Amino acid sequence: MTVTANVTVGETVKLLAEKRFRSIPVVDDDGKMLGQFGVSNLLKLAIPASASAKGGMRSADFMNDSITDLQRRLSDDWDKPVSDYCDNDTQTLAPDDSLTRTVICIAEGKQDNIPVVDPDSNRLVGIISYWDILDHLLKKNN
Amino acid sequence: MFALLSLLTQHGAPATNSVPHVIGGGNPLVVAGIIFVITYAIIMSEKFNRAVVALLGGGLMILTGVLNQHAAVQAIDWNTIGLLTGMMLIVAITRRSGVFQYLAIWSAKKVQAKPWGILVMLSIVTAVLSALLDNVTTVLLIAPVTLLITEELEIAPYPFLFAEILFSNIGGAATLIGDPPNILIGSMVESVTFNDFLVHIAPIVPLVFIATMLPIYIIWGRKMNASDEARQRVLNFREAEAIKDPKLLIKSLFVLTLVLIGFVVGHPMGIEPATVAMTGAALLMLLDNFGKDIEIKAENVHHTSGEVEWVTIFFFVGLFVIIGGLEHAGALDILAAQVVGLTDGIADSAGVTKVLTLGVLWISAVASAIVDNIPFVATMIPTLKAAFVQLAENGVDLDAAQQRTVWWALSLGACFGGNGSLIGASANLIVAGFAERAGHPIRFMTFVKTAFPLMIMSIIIASVYLWVRYL
């Protein structure tokens, strides 16, 4: 499952919540991979940019935020295109990458699903998640 | 340790005034000049990390035979290196206490979170911290919390960040430890002390502060407005929560106070700032780790040492060796002769002091706006020292007070000049970099259009100040 670039942040978040995904690939109209948008991207929009930016404040315990404050910050970006906020340095795999490389990528734990992208066309050809690996491991053991 | 190193480099090393033997029999002056020009050009182009380029340039000075190993070590000003490293260590520990965030929030709440009041308060905090700490460190600590406050107030952060850039450079001018040009002057010029900066330079800083604040008010301040709801959000901040470690805060403030006292009383006792700062850093590391498990102690000391900006330290080391090579080859005498040439036809020392002071002030200001002020000042110090010697040989002997006036001109020109553009000082680039990452980029020309005229105004004030007080 993917979202296209012009889908709004709000619609993407609803999709993530409905499907219980942690992240979802963002593609352009031709199916080319643009990046991933996930729960962590969403949460960064709910906190001040001065805390989420690199080199920003390491802690902000002095802030007295309520859920309304978080919603207020999110509302500024709710109707903007998701492509403005997706990570474009997502780890991807090529279709002919080895199983070992795939497992190492997932074992690193930075992403729980890895988009598989055709290196020539940059089109998204599939997604591999830790569930896929787990299913195959269980099958072998059984 | 630094006294020991200084002794070693002064007495333990072989004589360094021997004629350089350049590999291949080349002219040392030409070789040193080429290395200097190429290295500085690459540093200014900012295509490569400046520390790497400076170290390579320094290495070339030795490898080509312009300087031998011992002369190169002697050329490094250990007082500058020790002072920078010591203060970086102290700040690395102190910042963990959360005191800087506390100060910023406390000051914002003191003015009922009114935007203009906050700008003034944060500017004062920035100027004072910049005088006591390195400018880069100050803006690294203040810029994020400033952005947070403006985000909560839903107002543009640019005037605040603009003011902080300017006041970090203005405040930094006030003390020997406030800004790298002053650290260099205070370390490399024996006759200039920590107290001299307080007596001769600090008084002009409040004047320039107020004069710079007025245009900022006219341009932005009078139009600033925030809703009551937004202000209430800032007033709801609990600044006490920003203090992460009250015990560490007490230890840090204790050591910082001792260090400042050390700077003031140390010089008459022959104790230079490097010794004060490094001893203070060691004491704070000891207090910070007192009573902790041995493994945690080791890890803490390792971590704190890692927070020293080694890139800056290496940059200084490379720079000193390059300038040492230039000096050794006789190139600085030629530069000094150019400086002396500015005073042609003036026979009395008072007249020469006037021309040199104003010349150095304005040239330093414009140069520091265009290029990094650290390499500029590092080159100017030995050049001016050589110029004083040449002038004395010509029968125009500048006394200690007259020479000091010229050093003040270099300090004020380089510190205030850093405000002339976004690349004028390291602190400017640090704020611009952070603002960009947080989605509020500062445009080069937008900054220059306001900052350059304000820098010129500060140099006019400095000219009047120096003229009235010393010339």
Image (tube, coloured by chain):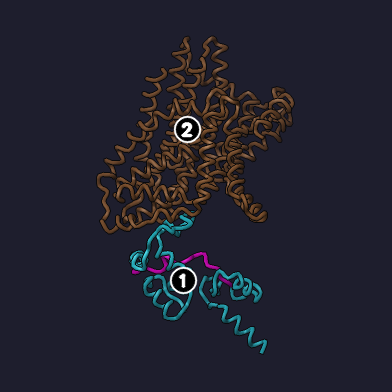
Chain colours: A cyan, B brown
- The answer for which chain carries disc 1 is A
Which secondary structure, mark 2? loop
Magenta includes B314?
no
Residue at 33%, 67% (x, y): give it: A68
Report x, y in % for residue B66.
69, 30
- Is residue B246 visible to us here? yes
Q: Nearer the viewer, residue A67 or B106?
A: B106
Mark seen at residue B175? 2
Which secondary structure, mark 1? strand
* Circle 2 Cα neighbour tier, 10 Å, few/some/many (<14 / 14–19 / ≥20): many
Closer to the eye: label 2 or 1: 2
Identify the amino acid type marked 1.
Gly
Magenta includes A91?
yes
Report x, y in % for residue B332.
59, 24
**What range is drawn magenta here?**
A78-93
Is B150 positioned to the left or the right of A3 in the image? left
Report x, y in % for residue B283.
60, 42
Is B426 positioned to the left or the right of B297 in the image? left
- The answer for which chain carries disc 2 is B
Callouts 2 and 1 on one subunit? no
* Circle 1 Cα neighbour tier, 10 Å, few/some/many (<14 / 14–19 / ≥20): some
Residue at 57%, 12% (x, y): give it: B393
Identify the amino acid type marked 2.
Thr
Question: Where is the C terminus of chain A found, in terms of image quarters?
Answer: bottom right
| Residue wearing tag 1 | A38
- Is residue B39 visible to us here? no
- Against B251, residue A122 (above or below) is below
Distance from disc 2 to disc 1, alpha carbons, whole Å, reads 49 Å
